[in-house]
């Protein structure tokens, strides 16, 4: 984005104090009786979950608690409960903005349906977002955790992953990882989250108990505030290179291709099960649209100078091996350098986003990392 003119500092209007007082009555901006949370632009998901969890509620967070709610949500946001409730962006109820003329405003489906649609999944090209109001969802009990096995169990774990995801209810999300931690032995893991009672979760995942030799198994009741501990992703910045692709399927041939070669020099080759509500957007869906592809492939490696070229080469090799299964589309929040916004939207959605951009920001004041205007 260009440097922000001084008039962008005017982000308040008369009457805003009443709104602030209304939210101040509720811890961390949560209105439990309405199942709504108000978050400022700098709030992270871990803060929202810590406030919502004791009230038996959750937001549609991703796997890492340190991620910005606003940045994640503007790009759609695919997380643990997206199979049940869809993109995080579709849970947005109102957005406080500063527009390209420096004027503050409040955007909703009633006040400005076009901009409201674009901001929910279309990225940061249209306005400065100063606050979001998000719907929360009932989460009286969660069950989940991570199970780790040594590398020689990889085939069995993949077989179990395919069996479980073939019949999984929308409340269950399962992600499989082939991990190669630097300086450690390779391993395979399943990350699991179930929006329901522990006994039901245990039944749904009983297939895993047939795989012997687990190194660790953290399955159990998970507090909402501890969702970030399931995948245990690093919270400190680190030089890394990520690439993601949507897969049209995952059959025996695709698994053969995935398992035929070592993970290194990558750190992780991950498959996330999608489907459910992500494939069926409701009438109030935002720009993210629908994701018909049932699986998301993630490839992560070191971005250090001595490793970056090897990381990119390995990512390209995996993608080439799986070419027949890769759709070419991908969610906005997992775009990486070299991608464009065109990969995330249908032709009609991209044209609509570009028209909104021209109308609301004709001088291109706002610059998203992946701008819709090309």
Image (cartoon, rainbow, N blue to C red):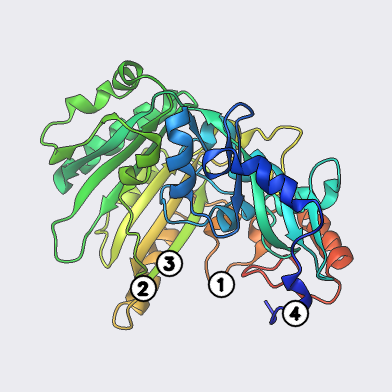
Quarter of the rendering occupied by the N terminus = bottom right
Q: Position of residue 167 (x, y in %)?
A: 43, 23
Q: Is residue 36 above or below residue 44?
A: above
| Disc sitting over residue 238 in the figure | none
Q: In this orientation, does residue 34 appear?
A: yes
Q: Decide if residue 74 is on the left or right side of residue 316.
A: right
Nearer the observer, 170 or 132: 132
Q: Residue furthest left?
A: 213
Mark 4 crowd level (few <14, some 14–19, many ≥20, 10 Å Cα): few
C-alpha distance separating marks 2 and 3:
19 Å
Circle 1 residue: 338
**Distance from Cα at disc 2 to Cα at disc 1:** 17 Å
Residue at left offset 53%, top offset 37%: 82
Q: CA distance from mark 1 to mark 4?
A: 33 Å
- Residue at horizontal 41 percent and vertical 51 percent from the top: 64
Whichever of callouts 2 and 3 sits on the residue coming sooner in the sequence is 2
Q: Which callout, 4 or 3, points at the residue further toward the start of the chain?
A: 4
Nearer to us of marks 2 and 3 is: 2
Q: For residue 291, which quarter of the picture? A: top right
**Extreme-right residue of the structure:** 359
User: In front: mark 1 or mark 3?
Assistant: 1
Q: Is residue 279 left or right of residue 186?
A: right
Q: Which residue is mark 3?
A: 316
Which x, y percent locates residue 257?
35, 51
- Mark with earlier residue (1, 3): 3
């Amino acid at each position: 984005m260009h440097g922000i003119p001084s008039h962008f500092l005017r982000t308040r209007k008369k009457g805003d104090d009443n709104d602030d007082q209304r939210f101040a009555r509720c811890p961390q901006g949560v209105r439990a009786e309405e199942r709504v949370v108000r978050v400022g632009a700098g709030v992270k998901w871990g803060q929202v979950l810590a406030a919502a969890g004791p009230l038996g509620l959750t937001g549609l967070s991703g796997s890492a608690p340190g991620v910005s709610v606003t940045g994640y949500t503007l790009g759609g946001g695919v997380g643990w409960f997206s199979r049940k409730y869809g993109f995080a962006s579709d849970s947005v109820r109102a957005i406080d903005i500063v527009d390209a003329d420096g004027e503050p405003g409040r955007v909703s489906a009633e006040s400005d349906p076009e901009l409201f649609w674009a901001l929910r999944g279309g990225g940061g090209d249209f306005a400065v977002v100063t606050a979001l109001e998000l719907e929360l969802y009932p989460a009286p009990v969660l069950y989940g955790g991570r199970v780790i096995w040594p590398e020689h169990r990889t085939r069995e774990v993949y077989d179990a992953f395919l069996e479980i995801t073939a019949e999984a209810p929308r409340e269950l999300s399962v992600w499989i990882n082939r991990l190669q931690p630097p300086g450690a032995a390779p391993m395979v893991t399943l990350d699991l989250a179930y929006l329901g009672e522990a006994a039901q979760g245990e039944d749904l995942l009983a297939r895993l108990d047939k795989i012997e030799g687990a190194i660790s198994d953290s399955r159990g009741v998970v507090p909402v505030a501890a969702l970030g501990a399931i995948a245990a992703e690093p919270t400190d910045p680190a030089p890394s290179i990520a690439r993601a692709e949507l897969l049209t399927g995952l059959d025996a041939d695709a698994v053969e291709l995935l398992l035929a070669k070592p993970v290194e020099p990558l750190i992780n080759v991950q498959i996330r099960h999608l489907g459910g509500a992500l494939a069926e957007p409701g009438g109030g869906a935002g720009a993210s649209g629908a994701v018909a592809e049932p699986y998301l492939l993630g490839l992560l490696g070191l971005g250090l100078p001595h490793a970056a070229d090897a990381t990119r080469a390995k990512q390209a090799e995996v993608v080439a091996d799986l070419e027949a299964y890769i759709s070419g589309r991908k969610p906005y929040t997992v775009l990486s350098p070299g991608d464009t916004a065109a990969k995330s939207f249908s032709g009609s959605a991209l044209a609509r986003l570009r028209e909104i951009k021209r109308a609301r920001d004709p001088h291109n004041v706002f610059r998203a990392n992946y701008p819709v205007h090309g």
